[in-house]
Image (cartoon, grey):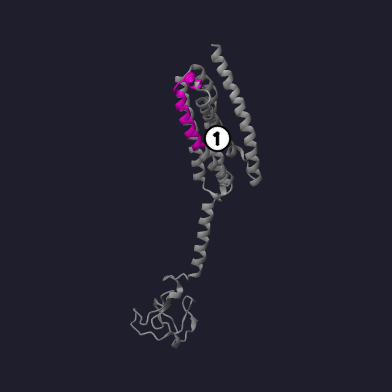
Amino acid sequence: MEEIIGSMFMGLLLLVIYAIAVTVIGFFFSHVFNKKYPNLSAGWIMALPTLHIVNGVGLFWVVMYIVYGFAFAPSVEHKIGDEIVGHFFISFLALLFVAITTVLLIYRGLNFTKTSYKKLKKSSIIATFIVVITTLICLIFDIFASLEVFVFFLTSHGTIIALIVYVQLKYNEQLQQMYATTDGETYEHTVYNGVRNISKSLSSLIPNVSLSSKQDIKNCPYCGEKILAVAVKCKHCGEWLPKEQEVKKKLIPCSVCGEEIEEGTRICPYCNEEVNQ
């Protein structure tokens, strides 16, 4: 019983050391973030990678401890059992993956304007998933090692897992708010906006031709009906139309509706009444 209580006490002591390390490292990265983005709060954006950094240091310590046990203290291997081999491989692989994902998470967090919301969120979830899964696997190995070792790691690692999951949820919330505050001004959005602006500029250089515009339709000088501007023969009265340069257009008001029509028009195209010349 005393050994179990001692293991719990050592687990709590490990949590205190963990909290101090998180505070110191988190303060440093928060200072860097706030210096780069003074209008934004670092908050959970830097808290999550800080947790992963401390976890990575812990994994490194475990790996080095096992290597030391194999190299300089073979009795440690016989004392703990074959489970230490599983600890070594799990911790070593986890250390590699956590180091890679955490570096990406820090870089993208400090340069979030150059990456997308989905990529940054995906990096955080992958890092958290690796830490949680490897910690749970190590706890399973601890069950077969000894009760004291299991209680020690359960007290510390169980609390750390709960903390990481909570920080991950808060990280997702603040990440979404951060991108909404900056109007999504990421690298991908900037490229998209640039292409869209270029497209608009090119579109403004191309004339907009519409068959329904008044410039593409004219009135027949003989019957007054509307015909295409490029027509050479009226489809209503069958008269051949003179060339544009030969037609001297003179506008007169319609005697019925008052709209301006071409001189010589017999039927007003607006009121469809006969025009008195």
Extreme-top residue of the structure: 1
Does 41 sit left or right of 85 as displayed? Answer: right
Q: Is residue 255 magenta?
A: no
Q: Does the magenta stretch include residue 86?
A: yes
152 or 34, which lies in front? 152
Q: Which amino acid does label 1 sit on?
A: His
Circle 1 sits in a helix, a strand or a loop, which is it? helix
Residue 158, compared with residue 122, is above or below; it is above
54 or 41, which lies in front? 54
Label 1, on which residue?
A: 52
158 or 5, which lies in front? 5
Does 241 sit left or right of 205 as displayed? Answer: left
Residue 219, compared with residue 155, is above or below; it is below
Does 28 sit left or right of 232 as displayed? Answer: right
Percent of width and height locating residue 2: 56, 12
Start and end of the magenta stretch? 75-98
Q: In which quarter of the image is the C terminus?
A: bottom left
